[in-house]
Amino acid sequence: QVQLVESGGGLVQPGGSLRLSCVASGISPISFGTYSIEWYRQTPGKEREWVAEITYDNNKNYANSVKGRFTIARDNAQKMVRLQMNNLKLEDTAVYYCHAVRRTNNSNYWGQGTQVTVSS
């Protein structure tokens, strides 16, 4: 059973930085490398919002709201994806979720989320 575990969330002041990690277990590094990994975020009462993606072939895409501030990277050998978040804003406050998806067979998995709070 594939599991994704996010970490790295916390409380930070506006303008600060955090680095989130998403680590997979129950899967080989080779198989992990066939998945695109996405980050989503959600605040109470709102729909889950797509934030960023790194594809299986290392293409990177970002939501306009985070472009230029967030950077996504992957390490298939470590079965890990990181999301570096710089110049954080109040509106970045949310629970951040990692999502692994392999579109060829609709296989996908979610992590349990990590809280990011940006507050002065």
Image (cartoon, grey):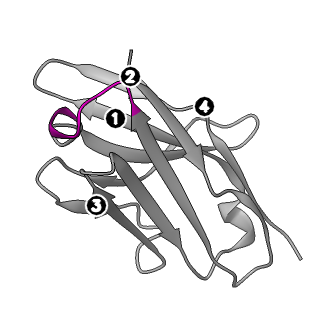
Mark 4–mark 3 CB contact (< 8 Å): no
Q: Are marks 2 and 4 in contact (CB under 8 Å)?
A: no
Query: Residue 73 at what x, y percent from top left?
Result: 33, 64
Q: Is residue 30 within the magenta segment?
A: yes
Q: Which residue is mark 3?
A: 61
Report the residue that reaches farthest toward the top. 1
The part of the chain drawn in magenta is 25-31
Mark nearest the camera among 3 and 1 is 1
Q: Are marks 2 and 1 in contact (CB under 8 Å)?
A: yes
Crowdedness of circle 2 by 10 Å Cα count: few (<14), some, many (20+)? some
Residue at x-position 56% and y-position 44%: 6
Q: Earlier in the sequence, mark 2 or mark 4?
A: 2
What is the C-alpha distance between the residues marked 1 and 4? 12 Å
Q: Amino acid at mark 3?
A: Asn
Q: Which residue is mark 2?
A: 2
Q: How far is disc 2 from disc 1 in space, using C-alphas?
A: 10 Å
Q: Disc 4 or 3, which lies upstream in sequence?
A: 3
Q: Which residue is mark 1?
A: 100
Of labels 1 and 4, earlier in sequence is: 1
Residue 96 in the figure: left or right of residue 39: right
Circle 4 — which element? loop
Q: Which of the two marks, 2 or 3, is nearer to us in this view?
A: 2
Name the kind of residue labelled 1 in the image: Ala
For label 4, the residue is 112
Residue type, numbered disc 4: Gln
Q: In the image, what residue type sits under mark 2?
A: Val
